[in-house]
Image: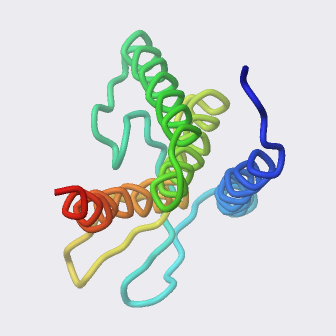
Amino acid sequence: MFKVNYKKLLHNSIIIAAIFLADRVSKFYILKIVETESVVDIYVNQYINLYLIWNKGIAFGLLSFNENYIYNLLTLLIITISTIILIMALRSEGFKKYSLLIVFAGSIGNLFDRIYYSAVPDFIDFHIKDFHWFVFNVADIFITLGIICLIFDEIFINNKKNEKIK
């Protein structure tokens, strides 16, 4: 029989909600600036500007298409992958579980925008001199951080577990 551990469920939900909320607040702030100023072009420091673009593709604007059926297909694919990530997180433990939860929370932040706005607002422009990275948002930061943690887990933590078994 399936038993629900409400303490773990609450803990996982708080992590997801906190990341989702941080993403929503940052996007709400940027969109409020656009509403009042009609454009966002803010110099933060020599490495970061805030500049709003609307991303209809996936990570970092890849696979951007104007056709609705491709956009809808990508959205369906993102929903499927996000569901798989959540299932994997619920079946995992420790560092890997939290890494997957971080990726999931970031993905639902962007998924919300894809469904609500039909595009994802990206606004963090990281650059060094004339080299500009892709414009991204807070959800993208968490997705990337979670993936880096998963890679770290696979290389260092799982590798140590496998060495002990041998």
Residue at coordinates 50% horizontally, 59% vertically from top-left? 142
32 in relation to 114, above or below:
below
Residue at coordinates 47% horizontally, 51% vertically from top-left? 53
Q: Position of residue 138 (x, y in %)?
A: 54, 61
92 in relation to 22, above or below:
above
**Picture quadrant of residue 147:** bottom left
**Picture quadrant of residue 152:** bottom left
Residue 84 is left or right of residue 4, and the answer is: left
Q: Position of residue 52 (x, y in %)?
A: 51, 57
Task: Using the image as rendered, state which of residue 49 and residue 58 is in the foreground.
Answer: 58
Which residue is the extreme one toward the left?
166
Which residue is the extreme one toward the front?
166
Task: Using the image as rendered, state which of residue 160 and residue 78 is in the foreground.
Answer: 160
Task: Using the image as rendered, state which of residue 42 and residue 70 is in the foreground.
Answer: 70
Image quadrant containing the C terminus: bottom left
- State the count of labels: 0
Residue at coordinates 66% horizontally, 62% vertically from top-left? 26
Q: How is the image coloured?
A: rainbow
**Picture quadrant of residue 125:** bottom left
Residue 3 is left or right of residue 138, and the answer is: right
Residue at coordinates 70% horizontally, 51% vertically from top-left? 12
Q: Position of residue 38 (x, y in %)?
A: 64, 56
45 in relation to 77, above or below:
below
Which residue is the extreme one toward the bottom?
46
Image quadrant containing the N terminus: top right
